Image: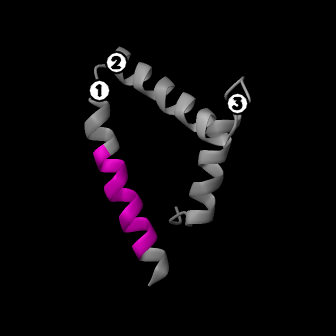
Amino acid sequence: MSIPTNATRTQWGANAIATNPDDNGDETNLADVLANLMHYADREGLNFDECLRMAYLHHADEVNEESN
């Protein structure tokens, strides 16, 4: 399997936001998706804060990889 580009990752994020049934603007829709993921993490016993910390690291690595 090939490594996705950041353009592909961006589209995945846009697809997730597009599933939000309300259209309250981009930032509010993003916040709603994040809140929904927090509910999911609660239900599954996952540490959302730790996942978000890892996401920051992944994002930084992916941006750095593509800029080199």
Report if the CB atoms under discs 2 and 3 are less than 8 Å apart: no
Q: Nearer the viewer, mark 2 or mark 3?
A: 3
Q: Which mark is residue 24?
A: 3
Place residue 50 in its image quadrant: top left
State how far apart marks 3 and 1 are (Cα).
28 Å
Query: From the viewer's perspective, is residue 39 above or below residue 1?
Result: above
Q: Position of residue 2 (x, y in %)?
A: 53, 66
Q: Give, as a three-letter code, the residue at label 2.
A: Asp
Q: Which mark is residue 31?
A: none
Mark 2, Cα crowd under 10 Å, few <14 / some 14-19 / many 20+, is few
Report if the CB atoms under discs 3 and 1 are less than 8 Å apart: no
State how far apart marks 1 and 2 are (Cα).
6 Å
Report if the CB atoms under discs 1 and 2 are less than 8 Å apart: yes
Q: Which residue is the site of mark 1?
A: 46
Is residue 54 found inside the magenta-colored segment of the image?
yes
Q: Nearer the viewer, mark 3 or mark 1?
A: 3
Q: Position of residue 24 (x, y in %)?
A: 70, 30
Question: At numbered mark 2, what does the secondary structure look like: helix, strand or loop?
Answer: helix
Q: Of 25 and 61, which appears nearest the observer?
A: 25
Q: Give, as a three-letter code, the residue at label 3.
A: Asn
Question: At numbered mark 1, what does the secondary structure look like: helix, strand or loop?
Answer: loop
